[in-house]
Amino acid sequence: MSEKPQVKSSPSFFNNPRNRSLIYQFLLLAGLAYFFYGIINNTLVNMEARGIKSGYDFLFTTAGFDILMSLIPYDATYTYGRTFVVGLLNTILVSTIGIVLATIVGFLMGVAHFSKNWLIRKLAVAYIETFRNIPLLLQIFFWYFAVLATLPGARQSLSIGEAIFLNVRGLYLPGLTAEPGAGFVYAAIGLAFTAIIFLVRWARKRQNDTGQQFPVFLTSLGILVGLPLVALLLSGIPFVWDFPALKGFNFRGGITIIPELMALVLALTVYTGAFIAEAVRAGVQAVPHGQTEAARSLGLKESKIMKLIIVPQAMRVIVPLLNSEYQSLVKNSTLATAIGYPDLFTVFVGTTLNQTGQAIEIVFMTMAVYFVINMSISFVMNRFNASVELAERN
Amino acid sequence: MKEFKPLPDKPAPADVVGVIPWLKDNLFPTPLNSLVTLALLAFFVTVIPPLFDWLFFSANWSGTTQDACTNKDGACWVFVIAWSKQFFYGSYPIEEVWRIHTCLIALVAIIIASFKLHKDLRNKVAIPLFLLLPFFSIVILDGSLIGLAYVSTDYWGGFTLNVMLAAASIIVAFPLSFLWALGRRSDMPFIRSVSVILIEFFRGVPVLALFFMGSVMLPLFFPEGTNVDKLLRVWIVLTLFMSGYMAEVFRGGFQAVPSGQYEAADSLGLSFWQKTLLIVLPQVIKISMPNILATFVMLFKNTTFLLIIGIFEMLSTTQTALANSNWLGGHSTEGYLFVAVVFWICCFSMSMISSSIERKLDTSHRN
């Protein structure tokens, strides 16, 4: 190999990969620069022609419109900045409820797919294949216009034990009103959670070190129920039930869930639940059957096989899929605007944009919010994923 | 020499074959399961007969106005029948509907051609035809360029619009997303970052926000006085949205092609584009087909979102029909059920095709 090549190969300038890639990238850069220059130029000209002043000053002017539902104090005298926060909180509310319920429904239905019972199995398949293949917007409309709108009026409300009422105006639940001293109970709940975290860590360490198991689940349950209960009794039960009651034409008191929220949550839960069920099914099916057989031959109980063998391996497939389902649930919650649930999209991109005309700022802010929410979901799920991932030995 | 003759198989024991053991195994395996089975059966018995009665036996089928729905215990299918033309064609002039049919037949013909043509011709014929189809359809449906009666896009609508928009978007998204996916794998840092930003942007933003961008912000981007048609803007948005998702599908496909294929192509001295188009692309498409179909189903379902920006696709037509003053009898269940069935049939058959391809590709011997 000491022999040198006879002819020194020197590719022409354009055939040199380095030069080539530089040229291509430069061309793309120039094209993009021209494109953005054109857009920005046009936008500035257009905005001037329409008399739109760019900037975020509009956030501090009075909004002057009411919002159907708000988690924080709000009326028409607050600013557009406040409408943004109201909408954001409503979006987070509906996404959180949707994610929790869809996960429960999805896991139940996904596991039902492996039931011994033929009827349950077929029911799970029917659920998945029906609701996965019907457009979400149609499902929202169905719940809102065909189901919830046909509920009886306030006087003929459906009720459970005179505490929960359901009528065309919404769902009325009894609420808890905190009185002075409730802080002790909240602190006790917090303390209980902290104690459980430490308990779980200690138990795992002890099992790793000595092999002895500790009844973590029962102890945790005891702590979680016991500590707040003790605090509740010691502080003299600082909570009062607030029951909804019919006053005039409508119910007062308690917690009101407006039909828009109900329809949206129902549709998102059922739709995303079907996708999660499918993910769970795929996850469980990805675990080779030999794993179950090996576990059985080791003499593990069926419940232990599920908990120790199947679930940890299935989670590796399920968690990344869950991540994308959660993200699409949050994105799909923008469909609220079709039935008028005041989420960020309805309030901000809908009403505020109409009133102020600040299209670019508003669309940009909204997109940024959805980006941040989805990034956070992704971050949490990736952390979770790292904990279930196959621990490879190096 | 005695010939070996196996004894005939003994029949399976009587307690594992037949209906009763099956019932015992699948419906009543444990006491708790038996209870569940009985509860479910009771539920079905109470729900299904009235449901069928409402859907079929007591339903009102004939007539043209709401007054024909005399039986209040049954569904009013008269509503769906009376509006069926609008559901499928929107307000497109009824004597010109053959144009919509022409476009749909062309679409189906090209899809069939791309499967059935001889493989030497397949790529050379089917791909250009696919790419031409959206423009061909626009010319035919619009009509003003070829001397047919002009039909403004304001009149396009109904289910056929859902189908055509979805098809037109995926056709253009195909080459675009392929380029983005290539860019994401590229060694050139600037091209890679641009691709990543494009893909993540169109995947990360709610599609509704993209539609609003298309209808509120795009007009600001064009020079003053240009009036871009609403449907055209929607088409652009749907195409970009679809490209973002498909680029990720293609990326998965690229990763699944064994690296030996790339190396073999390199050692044969193929150029980059020869390698990509002749060796890698066919394998990528084959591997990604189930996921492409799944993405297409999502796009197809998402075309209903166009209702929100005021395009008369099928769901939006249904809403209009439900609000019509001659039909204020609460037919929402019938209307939504009909739309749901139409979409369900399309989406379900596509996911069936997708999973059958998946099964064909899956050569692992699991279990």
Image (spheres, grey):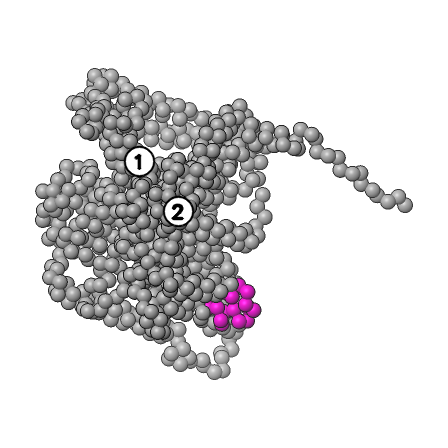
Q: Residue at x 55, y 38 (%)?
A: A291
Characterize the local packing of mark 2: few (<14), some (14-19) or many (20 or more) Cα atoms within 10 angstroms.
Answer: some
Characterize the local packing of mark 1: few (<14), some (14-19) or many (20 or more) Cα atoms within 10 angstroms.
Answer: few
Q: Which residues are magenta?
A: B113-127
Q: CA distance from mark 1 to mark 2?
A: 26 Å
Q: Residue A252 at what x, y percent from top left?
A: 19, 27
In the rendered view, does A212 fall on the left or right side of A27? right
Q: Residue at x 16, y 22 (%)?
A: A180
Please, what is the three-letter code of the amino acid marked with disc 2? Gly
Which mark is in front, 1 or 2?
2
Find residue A150 and name its label: 1
Of A44 and A316, nearer the camera is: A44
Q: Chain of mark 2?
A: B
Are dots 1 and 2 in contact, CB under 8 Å? no
Q: Residue at x 51, y 26 (%)?
A: B38
Q: Residue A274 at what x, y percent from top left?
A: 42, 42
Q: Which residue is mark 2?
A: B63
Residue B352 colored in magenta in the image: no
Q: Give the main secondary structure, helix, strand or loop, of the magenta stretch.
A: helix
Instruction: Name the residue furthest bottom.
Output: A7
When the figure is inspected, residue A232 is found, relative to residue A295, above or below; the finding is: above
When the figure is inspected, residue A138 is found, relative to residue A164, above or below; the finding is: below
Please, what is the three-letter code of the amino acid marked with disc 1? Thr
Of B240 and A9, nearer the camera is: B240
Kindly indicate whether the residues beneath marks 1 and 2 are on one polypeptide chain. Answer: no
